[in-house]
Amino acid sequence: MTPKAREPVERSHADQEAALDPRRCPEHGSASPLNPSQPKDADLSPTPHAASGGASGVTANQDTANPSRSRSDHSPYAEGVAAVFLDRDGVLNDQTAFVNKPEDFNLLPGAAAAVARLNRAGIPVVVVTNQGGIALGYLTEDDLAAIHERMATLLADEGAHTDKIYYCPHFASGTIARYANDCEDRKPGTGMLEKARDDLSLDLRKSVLVGDATTDILAGIRAGCRTILVRTGYAGKDGKAIAEPDHVVADLPAAVDLILTEPCV
Ligand SMILES: [Zn+2]
């Protein structure tokens, strides 16, 4: 159950997300639930990522500005709850083209229904997405907010919502100075997962991460989560890291089948 995980061995110029600096997103980091304006992770690799994740949040606390608050102060969930972390592009949405504006965002078949099943099961659904395209000037955080608004609308059309969205706008080789730095939030860093843990009082060891890229899986392994690779999106062929998922399934609906039928959450 403890997959081998190693640091990414390849760092393409397009994606240097392997850098896990201790530095964290100083200003961004956690996206608040319900807040469609939260940026998502846009992958920088040649294959564009699409936006995923609805921003509808059930969390009582949208305030991420006060890290000193205790978990119980703002979490609507019981302490130590298990969550399902979802990468956005290639898991929730089609990533065959970059998603830099709302109309670029389209959910994959069955994705909304799958999220709705998690919602009905009372399992928090947390989106964790690299949005290095912001550091490269492809889109702004406002653009990302609009994209997430569309995502939330599309999910809501099928009775689904995400509880919280976290994004990292940073990228070491970015062209926008304020975002051009290594950030531990950027997957395969675990910063976003840890923020979610603190914000929602999650137990990462009971939680599951679903992703399409090796960097997603590596982040999940490092955070102590169970990991599921889907064959949509990159299907694990991004070549950025070496990480062995606990499970490999066709798509998000199949991942949810597994999550709901096995006592892992
Ligand atoms: Zn960051």
Image (cartoon, helix red, strand yellow):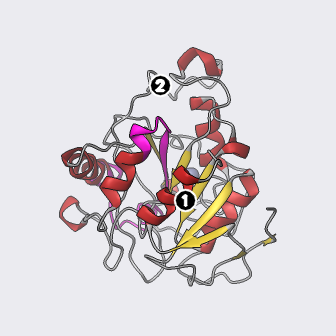
Judging from the image, what secondary structure is the residue with disc 1 in? helix
Distance of label 2 from label 1 (alpha carbons): 33 Å
Quarter of the image that includes the C terminus: top right
Q: Position of residue 143 (x, y in %)?
A: 28, 54
Judging from the image, what secondary structure is the residue with disc 2 in? loop
Report the side of 159 relative to 12 (left or right).
Answer: left
Q: Is 136 covered by the magenta stretch?
A: yes
Q: Nearer the viewer, residue 225 or 30?
A: 225
Give the residue pinned by disc 1.
258
Residue at point 31% right, 44% down?
160
Range drawn in magenta: 118-144
Residue type at mark 2: give it.
Answer: Asp
Q: Position of residue 23 (x, y in %)?
A: 70, 50
Task: Give above or below for 128 relative to 195.
Answer: below
Residue at point 43% right, 35% down?
32
Task: Give above or below for 39 relative to 246.
Answer: above
- CB of mark 2 near ligand 1 (< 8 Å): no
